[in-house]
Amino acid sequence: MQIKVKYSDGKEHTLSDLIIDIADIRTRIAVLNDLYAPKDEWRSFRYEEKEAKYQVPPEEIMNEITDLNKEKSNLDSILQHTNWTVELIE
């Protein structure tokens, strides 16, 4: 038996799809956070550093991270609500 949940897109998805989507969002957030991670202070002593020229402005990346965090929070809420309201078969 699979439990289906309605997303904000109006379509029904299974709980396993919901869990996978949350994991995918967490992965995307981690990758985006690593794009602009603080530099190692000692690296400048070991190697010649060049000025970074970003292809995408950091503000756009931060906005995307914010949007992904909101979506993850919403999906986490749906998952938690579903977990609390599902009747277990004994």
Image (cartoon, rainbow, N blue to C red):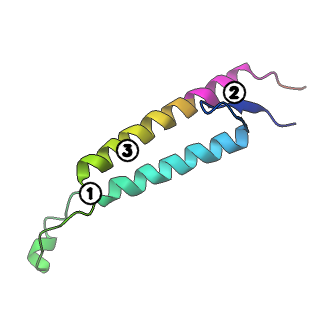
The amino acid at mark 2 is Asn
Q: Residue 48 got which mark?
A: none
Residues at circles 3 and 2 in contact by the CB criterion of under 8 Å: no
| 7 over 50 or under it: above or below | above
Question: In which quarter of the view is residue 80 placed?
Answer: top right
Q: What's the CA distance linking mark 3 and mark 2?
A: 26 Å
Earlier residue among tags 3 and 2: 3
Please give the residue where the numbered disc 2 appears in the rendered image.
83
Left or right: where does residue 10 sit relative to residue 63?
right
Earlier residue among tags 1 and 3: 1
Magenta residues span: 77-87
Please give the residue where the numbered disc 3 appears in the rendered image.
65
> Percent position (x, y) of residue 40?
19, 65
> Percent position (x, y) of residue 84?
69, 21
84 inside magenta stretch:
yes
Residue at horizontal 79 percent and vertical 33 percent from the top: 3
Q: Foreground: 32 or 48?
A: 32
